[in-house]
């Protein structure tokens, strides 16, 4: 492993691999480390990505969407045409929305490979242990780096080492694979008996589905809730993976000293639906370019904060605000049933996909 580099990126998920790729493409010496032995494994994700057109509608000021997407055809599992959302009493609301499900392990590997092709050095099975200024301690020894990118997910220890906050609200979520044919619509199931304060999902893949749920209150634990949802629907339980989704919006400060945070570590998630793959990649690109501008052209690292906020700060804050309002309603099945009836399919689409932000009527 390198002992000296311009930038060390901690975490080879969508945020870190994208940041590493762009910083390396610009000509900086990048070391990308991940504690996982195998990049992307185990998978803990719903594995859904919207199309570039949907992303551009949701994040109209975000740069690089056409460059970063569409997803590589080799990792696509199934084209998705829309959603069916089921209320606590079983009423169904349908709307169109284009996207695809992927194999998330292959997806992450593909992004890490792109970083390596751009010139980054990838070191898996390498854990970040701590840092002091430019000296970074890892499980494979010490590395000296001018800039440290915190792309190590929602519980970021790199952010902690710099005295930066991580997301204030982390929603527990669990997922597994179920075999079978499930059509081409994502299904969401609401109701406190299924997923208190959250929802369960069935996302079709090729010959199987990604089935999971996310909640607000972690009692009982999410794997227990997921097993109960699986048995209600007659699905055999696969290997369950659990994690957290940051749902309180971006952290207040994403640059401190020579450390910058990106992706889940920075709260770059659309809180109203828990989606964070695309936002992690868009902000990862901005981070990689900002790091290169800093190292090669003397621009302040703080420009990163300004750039990602102008790309999607407004939308991420709006989605977090909508999520806080929704949390009050999600606690009561009665209120939720009424609210879903009032909103109808178009309103539900707007709240879930666009954080309740779209003013004009949308395609339903
Ligand atoms: C159950 C679940 C379902 C989800 N479903 C979807 C979905 O369908 N669509 C969507 O868009 N988003 C979804 N999300 C959110 C999405 O997975 C994240 O927003 C996205 O992975 C963020 O990417 P990231 O690169 O910031 O972090 P991560 O993908 O979490 O990557 C962080 C990386 O850092 C590494 N790491 C952590 N600590 C260290 C350390 N100390 N040293 C070295 N490496 C370290 C980890 O091993 C990991 O590889 C879901 C999340 C969960 C939990």
Image (cartoon, rainbow, N blue to C red):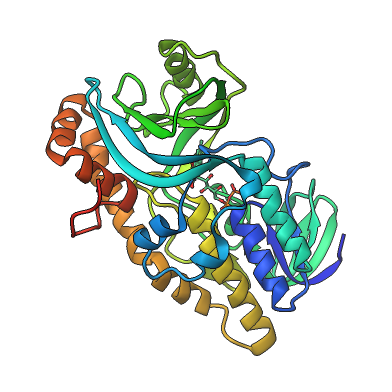
**Residue reaching furthest bottom?**
297
Classify residue 240 by image quadrant.
Answer: top right
Q: Is residue 273 above or below residue 135?
A: above
Q: Residue 174, can we see it?
A: yes
Q: Nearer the viewer, residue 329 or 56?
A: 56
The percent coordinates of residue 341 (x first, y second) are 14, 33
| Residue 67 vs residue 302, the one in the foreground | 67
Residue 113 percent location from the top left of the image: 74, 56
x and y percent of residue 101 in the render?
A: 52, 40
Quadrant of the rendered image containing residue 32: bottom right
Q: Which of the image's four quarters has the C terminus?
A: top left
Count of picture labels: 0
In percent of width and height, residue 311 lies at: 42, 70
Would you say 151 lies left or right of 218 here?
A: right
Note whether residue 165 is visible: no
Q: Residue at x 53, y 70 (%)?
A: 255
């Amino acid at each position: 492993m390198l002992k000296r580099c311009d930038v060390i990126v901690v975490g080879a998920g969508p945020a870190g691999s994208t940041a590493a790729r762009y910083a390396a493409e610009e000509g900086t010496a990048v070391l990308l480390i991940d504690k996982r032995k195998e990049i992307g494994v185990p998978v803990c994700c719903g594995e859904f990505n919207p199309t570039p057109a949907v992303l551009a509608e949701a994040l109209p000021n975000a740069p690089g969407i056409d460059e970063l997407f569409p997803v590589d055809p080799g990792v696509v599992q199934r084209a998705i045409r829309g959603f069916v959302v089921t209320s606590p009493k079983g009423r169904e609301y349908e709307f169109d929305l284009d996207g695809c499900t992927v194999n998330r392990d292959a997806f992450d590997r593909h992004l890490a490979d792109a970083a390596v092709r751009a010139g980054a050095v990838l070191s898996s099975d390498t854990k970040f242990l701590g840092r002091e200024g430019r000296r970074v301690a890892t499980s494979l020894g010490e590395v000296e780096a001018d800039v440290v990118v915190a792309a190590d997910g929602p519980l970021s220890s790199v952010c902690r080492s710099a005295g930066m906050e991580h997301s204030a609200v982390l929603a527990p979520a669990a997922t597994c694979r179920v075999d079978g044919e499930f059509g081409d619509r994502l299904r969401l199931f609401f109701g406190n008996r299924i997923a208190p304060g959250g929802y369960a999902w069935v996302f079709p893949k090729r010959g199987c589905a990604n089935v999971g749920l996310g909640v607000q209150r972690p009692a009982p634990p999410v794997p227990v809730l997921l097993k109960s949802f699986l048995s209600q629907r007659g699905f055999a339980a696969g290997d369950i993976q659990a994690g957290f989704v940051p749902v309180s919006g971006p952290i207040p400060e994403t640059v401190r000293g020579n450390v910058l945070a990106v992706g889940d570590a920075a709260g770059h998630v659309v809180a109203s639906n828990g989606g964070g793959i695309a936002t992690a990649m868009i902000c990862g690109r901005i981070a990689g370019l900002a790091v290169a501008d800093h190292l090669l052209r003397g621009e302040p690292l703080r420009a990163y904060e300004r750039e990602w906020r102008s790309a999607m700060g407004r939308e991420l804050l709006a989605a977090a605000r909508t999520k806080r309002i929704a949390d009050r309603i999600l606690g009561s099945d009665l209120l939720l049933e009424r609210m879903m009836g009032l909103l109808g399919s178009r309103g539900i689409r707007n709240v879930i996909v666009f954080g309740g932000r779209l003013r004009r009527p949308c395609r339903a």
